[in-house]
Image (cartoon, rainbow, N blue to C red):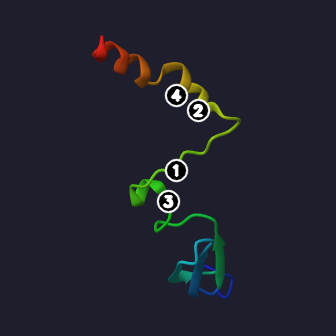
Amino acid sequence: MKSDIHPEYREARIICACGNIIETRSTVPEIHVEICSSCHPFFTGRQKLVDTAGRVEKFRARYGKKESTEAEAVEA
């Protein structure tokens, strides 16, 4: 094997957009990420609905429960 061809493996910081900082080791001293295990919905159990062009509301309006018809049926 050739000597002195491997990069230096040193302490590194992973910085998330949410502000979480993770200390690890890497050949790169600082890594910036958008999502980490502290803010990702798979790991936190919180899921955010990202609504593009009102698709969620359109689905709920079309297939969702209609409360007014159920209340009228109970009264009748």
Residue 25 visible from this viewpoint: yes
User: Which numbered disc, 4 or 1, marks the residue closer to the eye?
Assistant: 4
Question: Which circle's residue, 2 or 1, is located before the other in the chain?
Answer: 1
Pointer 2 residue: 57
**Is 75 on the left or on the right of 53, as rendered?**
left
Q: Distance of mark 2 from mark 1, alpha carbons?
A: 14 Å
Q: Are marks 4 and 2 in contact (CB under 8 Å)?
A: yes
Q: Distance of mark 4 from mark 2, alpha carbons?
A: 5 Å
Tell me which corner region of the image, top left, top right, bottom left or bottom right, holds residue 10.
bottom right
| Mark number displayed over residue 60 | 4
Question: Which circle's residue, 3 or 2, is located before the other in the chain?
Answer: 3
Question: Which circle's residue, 3 or 1, is located before the other in the chain?
Answer: 3
Q: Distance of mark 3 from mark 2, alpha carbons?
A: 24 Å
Question: Which circle's residue, 4 or 1, is located before the other in the chain?
Answer: 1
Pointer 3 residue: 40
Q: Distance of mark 4 from mark 3, alpha carbons?
A: 25 Å
* Amino acid type, residue under disc 3 in the picture: His
